Image (cartoon, rainbow, N blue to C red):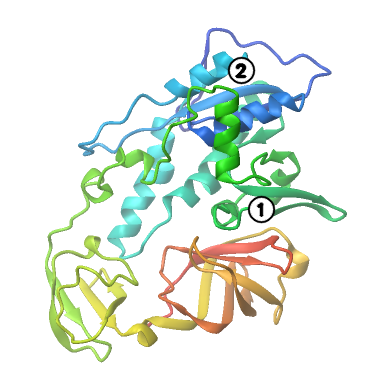
Amino acid sequence: MTRKNSQLNIRLHSPTLEPWVDGKRPIIVLMSGGVDSSVTALLLKRAGWDVLGITMKIPVAEKCDVQRSCCGVEAAYVCKDLEIAHYYLDVQDAFHELVIEPFRQAYSRGETPSPCIDCNTVFKFGLVWDFLEQVFGIKHLATGHYARILQTETGARLARGKDTKKDQSYFLYGIPAHRLQNFLLPLGDLTKPEVRALAKETHLPVARRPESMELCFAGEGDYRNALGLDSSQEGQVLDMAGNVIGSHNGIANYTVGQRKGLGIAAGKPIYVAKIDAENNTITVGEWDEVSEHDVNACETNVLIPDELQLNSRLLGKIRSQGEPSDCIVTGLNEDKIGVKFTKSQFAPTPGQRLVLYNKDGHVVAGGKITSTRS
């Protein structure tokens, strides 16, 4: 049977589609066919949940020259071994519209987008979750992310994972607050070696599968080529005073904070400080010149409103790696946040994300970093 969402052309492919039996604990697991989502399904079944595996058929960018295996082949085998139902969700058109095209447009503006966060925020925990709940009537959803959902007296909260080096709460900050109470993250208290050990002990067919480190829709290849980004239009490289000190080979080849591949013999380490798409220029500077105390963000999602106040002292991250740093909230305006870090942050990058935590590691809010340079 095929069920379709006509607005964004989502199709659910399955041989049969029957209502869930009352009295069970049904839950949907988004399964890519990797180790993490497979072990997530395993743990939930062991805990007594009635698991339904869903694999999204993600498109490959039209100019991709690297092919990947068919979406969900491994997930289907895992579901068969675990004796749980498995369905494919064809989301190719919607994914292109909501993730790939905004990614391409952001690069054309000189930003450095975060497509994985956009996929989570707008796509998985927005459009897809709404569709699956409508079709199956199942409220609970789980993924294989390394973060935690904590039930507190004031409601459910998103928190950092036990393994702080693997923690992925940064990528999940955009989930709607009302969804947290029905969101499960079984891997939040585990480390990656522990997850692989569980997969091996259970003889899951994906136990030895390597991690994917690149963008799924670029076929694990060069996303610039896959998206048809113009990476050959030459332009000027400027110093912080606006003087021309060299040339670049296309702004799509650079990101804020980049050091390697600049082709400028400055006699000292220099980094990309700004990308001006309108004038096709790149500005470079030394470490201190590229670093900032003040960081602003827009399109914010607030998960703990009571803790996001002017002068609130929180911990912030401007990239996924590393530990959160002390900061104070200096501005709040509709969907915008401004913070001042105690220690300057290297290369806040427009298009990347600012995520704020409290002292307990709970996600308070997050948003898209905007340029602070004139």
**Residue nearer the viewer, 39 or 156:** 39
Whole-percent x and y of residue 138? 70, 26
**Residue ID for mark 1:** 162
**Residue drawn at the location 12% of the way across and 80% of the way down:** 246
Image quadrant in which the C terminus is located: bottom left
Name, please, the residue furthest toward the bottom.
241
Report the side of 352 relative to 283 (left or right).
right
Q: Using the image, determine if residue 210 lies above or below residue 41.
A: below
**Residue drawn at the location 60% of the way across and 23% of the way down:** 202
Whole-percent x and y of residue 104? 31, 51
CB contact under 8 Å: marks 2 and 1:
no
Residue 101 visible, this orientation: yes
Q: Which mark is residue 302?
A: none
**Residue nearer the viewer, 315 or 45:** 45
Q: Which mark is residue 82?
A: 2
**Residue drawn at the location 34% of the way across and 26% of the way down:** 69
Measure how far apart labels 2 and 1 are at the Cα level: 26 Å
Task: Check disc 2 and give the amino acid type.
Answer: Leu
**Residue nearer the viewer, 363 or 306:** 363
Task: Check disc 1 and give the amino acid type.
Answer: Lys
